Image: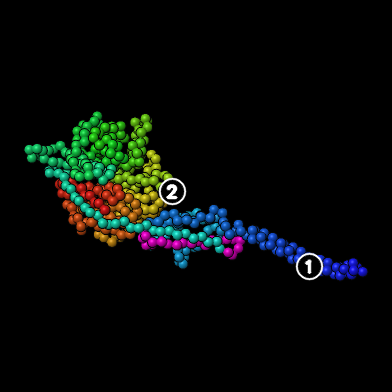
Amino acid sequence: MQKYHLSKFNFPILSLKKKVFIVMLKIITTFIFLTGLFFFSCNTTEPDNKPADFEFAAEDASCTEAWITLKVNNIAGAKVYRGDSLLFNLTLQNIDTTLYDEGLLPNHVYKYHTSIQLYSNSNAVTKELTLQTMDTTSHNFTWQTFTFGQHSSSVLYDVAIINENNIWAVGEIYMNDSLGNPDPHAYNAVHWDGIKWDLIRINTQSDCNPVTYAPLRAIWAFSDSNIIITSGGSIGWFNGKTNKADCNIRPMLTGSINKIWGTSSSDLYVVGNGGNIAHYDGSPLANGWTKIESGTELDFLDIYGATDSKTNEQQILAVCTRNYPLGKAIFQLEGNIATQITSTPIQWELFSCWFVPNRHYYVIGSGIYEKSSLSDSVWRNEALDITHYGTSRIRGNAINDFFVVGAYGEILHYNGFNWKSFLPELGSLNGSYGSVDIKGNLVVITGFDAVTAKITIGIR
């Protein structure tokens, strides 16, 4: 009876547990189904929110400009903002470009973001970046001036800084002899040892140059013992003490050499009068020299090159001019090929060039002209906030630190934000500055003042 009694009451209890178990099983099954559905649903839209090869990055910045890389494919459009301001509204399907923003402040942090619209849904994909503009460099230079020459017309045509205790300037300097009489044999160089300037006569005599101490027109220095000089008609390999003339270039010249530029003693370019351009690569063929046809008879007065940091390719520009009848041209050199590029709307002479690849290119002469890319069709001549004369040479450390020198002793410095003329501070010349070299916080400028050669050194 007791056993039966227990059995009688156990059946309802087991039945209740079974019902609870069935309900719980249904809940768990439903949960798993919904979770899986949610997971697969999210997973199918994820690729639409992450376009392949989507790049939005700071490429470079000057004191007042920014360059931003935007790369993305298969989209409906893109918008780029600086802060809350819309800068670009692009409706392209595939974008691979460098965006340019200007009018910024030096040494300032800016935040940019892009909004990419996709085809598959209405949701936009965004990316952000932060960049800081360059700071300006200082206009605060301490200046020293030096003059050389006692008779005739002394002048220094070119200068090369090796370091602060080793500077060479070349030209022609006429001094009196020990009896006080005019010495017809010119000194053709001066050397700075960190304390004083020494007058130097570098022997230029060779099979192709009968003059023992010919005036030197240009100089280029790779080190204290690897220096290249020219008396106009030949090249000399100068080790700081003795000169070894190289007459192999003579058959290629129809005029004198005016300027030298190169990356090494086996990659050297010279330009000169009558459209002359030649390249030295050190190879046995033609004793290392190759004549580059320019197709012009204008006089090349300057050449400059720099390496593109993005492509690692070398860019080289050369400028040529003629006073009468007036002519001017700009050439780009690629290997041993010279190609004339636009000089629109420049009307007058061009004397010098300098640039930072794909950022700013400058040519100067009767004005200062600039453009941001070699592919730009027009050179811009923006009015400066100072009065300037004709300009003859431009060189710099960076786009926020370069000098322009010229007639009547004009010395201009650009610090990335504004220009400063040192003419009021240093006074004018009865002559002109024709060359400048800058290395770090040291700048050396050469030219002439009346019948004397002149050097001005600035230390920041």
Q: Is residue 155 visible?
A: no
Q: Residue furthest right?
A: 1
**Residue 333 on the magenta segment:** no
Q: Which mark is residue 441?
A: none
> Label 1, label 2: how many angstroms apart (C-alpha)?
70 Å
Q: Residue furthest front?
A: 2
Q: Position of residue 276 (x, y in %)?
A: 31, 40
**Which of the two marks, 1 or 2, is nearer to us in this view?**
1
Q: Secondary structure at mark 2?
A: loop
Give the amino acid type for the residue marked by disc 1 in the picture: Val
Q: Residue at x 39, y 53 (%)?
A: 359
Q: Which residues are magenta?
A: 104-123
- The residue that mark 2 highlights is 310
Name above or below for residue 27 compared with residue 69.
Answer: below
84 lies left or right of 180: right
310 lies left or right of 125: left
- The residue that mark 1 highlights is 20
Q: Position of residue 165 (x, y in %)?
A: 24, 44
Point out the tag, 1 or 2, that comes first from the N-terminus: 1
**Residue 119 on the magenta segment:** yes
Q: Secondary structure at mark 1?
A: helix
Q: Position of residue 56 (x, y in %)?
A: 49, 56
Give the amino acid type for the residue marked by disc 2 in the picture: Lys
Q: Nearer the viewer, residue 289 or 226?
A: 226
Q: Residue at x 36, y 60 (%)?
A: 106
Mark 1 neighbour density, 10 Å: few (under 14) some (14–19) many (20 or more): few
